[in-house]
């Protein structure tokens, strides 16, 4: 068995892993990237549409162009990486067990680990659609890989379930390739993805978007022949007698993404309600020296935000190796960040009291769309941060960047609550507006 | 929030477009009034500019794939260097599907010059090493 000792191991070479590895290397660390695919780059490679890099590079790039810049930088910095390498376990002592065809079984001892494994798509099993199991049912990202990397088109007539961004982008891509997209069917009363994609991918090509509906049966035994869609009530229950039949030979599912955290939980880190590991404002999990960034932590809308988060993880992991590794761990003075009214989840889950005066990045998603709201952070009932927003929707991640003055937070503060409230609820506040 | 424009005339009497500049998604309406186009419903200056471009000369960047000979992968993602008129999108995609390019290719390499005489090049979106 081959054994290696390194400063920082990065699991996954997508936009998160590359960004974190580059930053850690710049901080003088001895870094190793482990990637299960046969090339660096991750899922961004198959997102051949434009709209990437507007924030970081101030340019409108395609996914492959965006990630190529990180691949080139990692290669210039001579960061070692292993491709076709599957990590099978991470231990609490930060030992990594991995396998690949050339070297067989590998044991890697790292001082710090950065988790950047990304997320995966929900499949038919996650949403229980009745019917046979014919060929022709794909997740949207799987179809995206077939079309944009492998070079073949998996069907002729499509119904897309779910209005996530990848689903809508695939609707346009397939239309461009001469396929017919009969409908995008969404169970909610609003679109799951970005408005930009609704307009430029569906409305531009007159692809029907059917809200408040879902697929209630898949027809066909060997190959998909069609679907039954039904309208649903507020509880997402099927409304009797609302069935419509749509003929198609393929179905794409764009019904959500789940952070891929099997390795994380094996290493002893706990997950929070969004499916990502619990982290503090250093992006460190509850396991000392194990950090997380990118879609494994929280599913992002924009890759630019992933790169930015990854950079912070890379930097903090380097600080850990330099300042804390091998020393007795001091007890953390954690303040818990609690998602309150209309907040689905918030990252980080904890903030270190000693970091309150530093620039903190909070990311959250609302549960329901709303207009004219105020985002507040409260210590018990005292508001310590507030910002007005004209519009919020679950598909757009909200970022709050702020520093706190120590005099406004009490020294024995243990909890801060973050809420998204209608402005009308807070008319008493003078500063609103 | 209204603005008259003499720049062009709408083909229809009335047109509604959804603004994509920010997540608010304002509904912008353009109407022919006494030979002028009146645009209402935008929430900001950027929205107004978006609406004018979308009404009078809608453009899109085309992203597609082309077949590759001797490449690490069978196809390569490509894009138009600049946005092109929306009505030319399908012609360009069809043209690209009939051309084969040869590896190795570097990101940014020009693969088709002046496609469709639009004075826009088609460039590679990624490196494509030779198959080993």
Image (cartoon, rainbow, N blue to C red):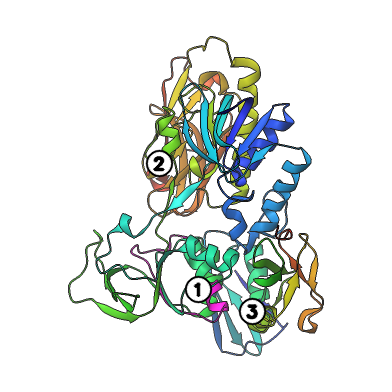
- Of tags 2 and 1, which is closer to the observer? 2
- Find residue A131 and report its image quarter: bottom left
Q: CA distance from mark 2 to mark 1?
A: 30 Å
Task: Please tell me whether residue A180 belongs to the stretch shown in magenta.
Answer: yes
Q: Which mark is residue A202?
A: 1
* Rendered residue at 28%/64% (across/down): A129
Image vertical order of residue A162 relative to residue A82, above or below? below
Q: Is residue A265 visible?
A: yes
The numbered dot on residue A275 is 2
Q: Which numbered circle lies on residue A381?
A: none
| Label 2 SS | loop
Identify whether A408 is placed above or below A391: above
Instruction: Please provide percent x and percent y for residue A226.
Output: 32, 78
> Over which residues does the magenta segment extend?
A172-193
In the image, which is nearer the foreground, mark 3 or mark 2?
Answer: 2
Quarter location, residue A344: top left
Chain under disc 3: B
Who's the residue at 52% across and 25% down the image? A95
According to the picture, the residue beneath numbered tag 3 turns out to be: B55
In this picture, residue A291 sits left or right of residue B124: left
Where is residue B53? Give x, y as percent: 68, 74
Instruction: State which quadrant residue A269 falls in.
Output: top left
Q: Chain of mark 2?
A: A
Q: Position of residue B97 (x, y in %)?
A: 66, 79
Residue B132 pos. (x, y %): 70, 57
Protein chain holding label 1: A
Question: Residue placed at 38% from the left, 28% from the top?
Answer: A381
Same chain for mark 3 and mark 2? The answer is no
């Amino acid at each position: 068995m081959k054994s290696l000792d390194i400063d920082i191991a990065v699991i996954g070479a997508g936009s998160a892993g590359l960004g974190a590895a580059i930053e850690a290397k710049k901080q003088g660390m001895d870094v190793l990237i482990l990637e299960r695919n046969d090339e660096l780059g991750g899922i961004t490679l198959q997102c051949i549409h434009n709209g990437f890099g507007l924030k970081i590079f101030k340019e409108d790039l395609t996914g492959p162009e965006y990630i190529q810049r990180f691949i080139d930088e990692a290669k210039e910095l001579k960061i070692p990486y292993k491709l076709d390498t599957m990590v099978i376990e991470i231990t609490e002592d930060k030992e990594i067990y991995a396998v690949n065809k050339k070297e067989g079984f590998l044991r890697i001892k790292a001082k710090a680990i950065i988790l950047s494994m990304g997320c995966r798509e929900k499949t038919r099993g996650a949403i229980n659609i009745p019917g046979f199991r014919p060929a022709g049912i794909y997740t949207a990202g799987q179809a995206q890989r077939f079309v944009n990397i492998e070079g073949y088109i998996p069907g002729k007539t499509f119904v897309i379930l779910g209005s996530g961004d990848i689903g809508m982008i695939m609707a346009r891509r397939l239309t461009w390739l001469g396929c017919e997209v009969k409908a995008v069917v969404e169970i909610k009363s609003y679109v799951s993805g970005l408005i930009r994609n609704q307009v430029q991918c569906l409305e531009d090509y007159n692809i029907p978007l059917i809200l408040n509906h879902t697929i209630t049966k898949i027809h066909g035994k060997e190959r998909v022949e069609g679907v039954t869609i039904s309208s649903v009530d507020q509880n997402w229950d099927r409304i009797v007698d609302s069935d419509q039949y749509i003929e198609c030979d393929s179905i794409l599912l764009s019904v959500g993404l789940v952070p891929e955290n099997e390795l994380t939980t094996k290493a002893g880190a706990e997950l929070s309600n969004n499916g990502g590991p619990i982290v503090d404002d250093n992006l460190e999990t509850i396991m000392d020296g194990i950090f997380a960034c990118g879609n494994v932590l929280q599913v992002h809308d924009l890759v630019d935000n992933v790169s930015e988060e990854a950079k912070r993880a890379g930097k903090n992991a380097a600080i850990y190796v330099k300042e804390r590794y091998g020393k007795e761990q001091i007890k953390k003075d954690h303040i818990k960040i609690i998602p309150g009214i209309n907040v689905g989840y918030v990252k980080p889950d904890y903030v270190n009291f000693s970091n309150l005066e530093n620039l903190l990045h909070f990311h959250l998603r609302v549960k329901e769309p709303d207009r004219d709201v105020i985002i507040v952070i409260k210590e018990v009932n005292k508001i310590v941060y507030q910002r007005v927003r004209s519009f919020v929707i679950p598909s757009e991640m909200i970022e709050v960047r702020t520093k706190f003055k120590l005099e406004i937070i009490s020294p024995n503060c243990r909890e801060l609550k973050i809420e998204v409230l209608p402005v009308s609820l807070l008319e008493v506040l003078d500063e609103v507006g | 929030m209204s603005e008259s424009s003499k720049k062009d005339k709408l083909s229809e009497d009335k047109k509604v477009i959804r603004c994509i500049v920010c997540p608010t998604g304002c509904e912008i309406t353009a109407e022919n009034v006494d030979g002028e186009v009146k645009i209402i419903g935008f929430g900001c200056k950027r929205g107004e500019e978006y609406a004018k471009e979308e009404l009078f000369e809608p453009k899109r960047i085309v992203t597609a794939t082309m077949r590759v000979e001797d490449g690490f992968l069978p196809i390569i993602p490509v894009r138009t260097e600049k946005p092109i008129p929306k009505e030319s999108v399908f012609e360009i995609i069809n043209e690209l599907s009939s051309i084969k390019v040869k590896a190795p290719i570097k990101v940014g390499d020009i693969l088709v010059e002046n496609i469709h005489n639009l004075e826009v090049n088609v460039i590679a979106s990624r490196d494509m090493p030779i198959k080993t």
